[in-house]
Image: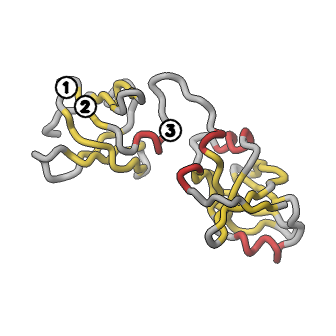
């Protein structure tokens, strides 16, 4: 069952997964999770996809694991041809449905725009993006005006990332200005 939302304001939503290839003949599909813990998708009650300029609610019948893959099915779709139109669509959840985090924790999207300060109280720059090149997540910092190239800091807690202060919109890092 799908219902249209009147407000396609993407700032209210968080991209959490992508619908992949079909699986079998009964409308199942592979689901690629972008969550740190793919099983956490089962904690959400509402999912949405973007169709033209509208956010549509998608009623998932289930999300299950099969051979380390996530498999899902939309309640109102029971055949392979009907699910093909959903292939490669992004799946969103409302940001308001995200679980509350402990102090000194943040979602990756909350890190964007935070000031980065080192232990010597030097302002290094602002988080531009969080990437993952395989080994660990990396903060890409747009540097302060006296430096031209971006600063890349591995997101490793208690080694390089000392603390996150959401109220001050800042991250304290163990990183020298000239690294």
Cα distance between the residues tagged 3 and 1: 24 Å
Going from N to C along the chain, the mark reached first, 3 or 1, is: 3
| Label of residue 85 in the image | none
Question: Which residue shows up at 40% across the image and 52% down it?
Answer: 133
Q: Quadrant of the N terminus?
A: bottom right
Q: What residue is pinned by disc 3?
A: 107
Tell me which residue sits at (49%, 22%) in the image. 103
> Which residue shows up at 47% across the image and 45% down it?
109
- Seen from the viewer's position, the closer of residues 100 and 149 is 100
* Mark 3 → mark 2, Cα distance in angstroms: 19 Å
Q: Helix, strand, or loop for circle 1?
A: loop
- Crowding at dot 2, Cα within 10 Å, few <14 / some 14-19 / many 20+, comes out as many
Q: Give the CA separation, mark 1 to mark 2.
A: 6 Å
Q: Is residue 102 above or below residue 7?
A: above
The x, y position of residue 70, in whole percent, is 72, 52
Q: How many residues crowd around disc 3 within 10 Å: few (fewer than 14), some, or many (20 or more)?
A: few
**150 over 175 or under it: above or below:** below
Residue 157: x, y in percent?
40, 28
Q: Can you tell which quarter of the image residue 124 is in?
A: top left
First-in-chain label (3 vs 2): 3
Q: Residue 93: image x %, image y %?
A: 65, 49
* Circle count: 3
Residue that mark 1 sits on: 121
Residue 101: x %, y % from top left:
55, 28
* Residue 92 in view of the camera: yes
Is residue 94 or residue 7 the one in the foreground? 7
Instruction: Check contact, mark 3 vs mark 1: CB within 8 A.
Output: no
- The residue located at (36%, 33%) in the rendering is 169
- Side (left or right) of 66 relative to 98: right
Label of residue 117 in the image: 2
């Amino acid at each position: 069952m799908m219902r249209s939302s009147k407000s396609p304001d993407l700032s209210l939503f968080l991209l959490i997964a992508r619908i992949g290839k079909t699986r079998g003949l009964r409308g199942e599909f592979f689901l690629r999770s972008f969550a740190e813990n793919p099983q956490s998708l089962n904690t959400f009650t509402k999912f949405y996809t973007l169709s033209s300029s509208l956010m549509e609610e998608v009623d998932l019948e289930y999300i299950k694991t099969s051979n380390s893959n996530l498999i899902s099915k939309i309640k109102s779709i029971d055949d392979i041809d009907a699910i093909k139109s959903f292939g490669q669509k992004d799946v969103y959840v409302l940001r308001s449905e995200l679980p509350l985090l402990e102090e000194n924790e943040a979602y990756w999207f909350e890190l964007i725009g935070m000031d980065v300060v080192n232990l010597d109280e030097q302002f290094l720059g602002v988080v531009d993006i969080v990437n993952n090149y395989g080994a660990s997540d990396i903060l890409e910092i747009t540097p302060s005006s006296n430096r031209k190239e971006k600063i890349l800091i591995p997101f490793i807690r208690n080694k390089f990332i000392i603390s996150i202060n959401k109220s001050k919109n800042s991250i304290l890092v163990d990183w020298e200005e000239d690294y």
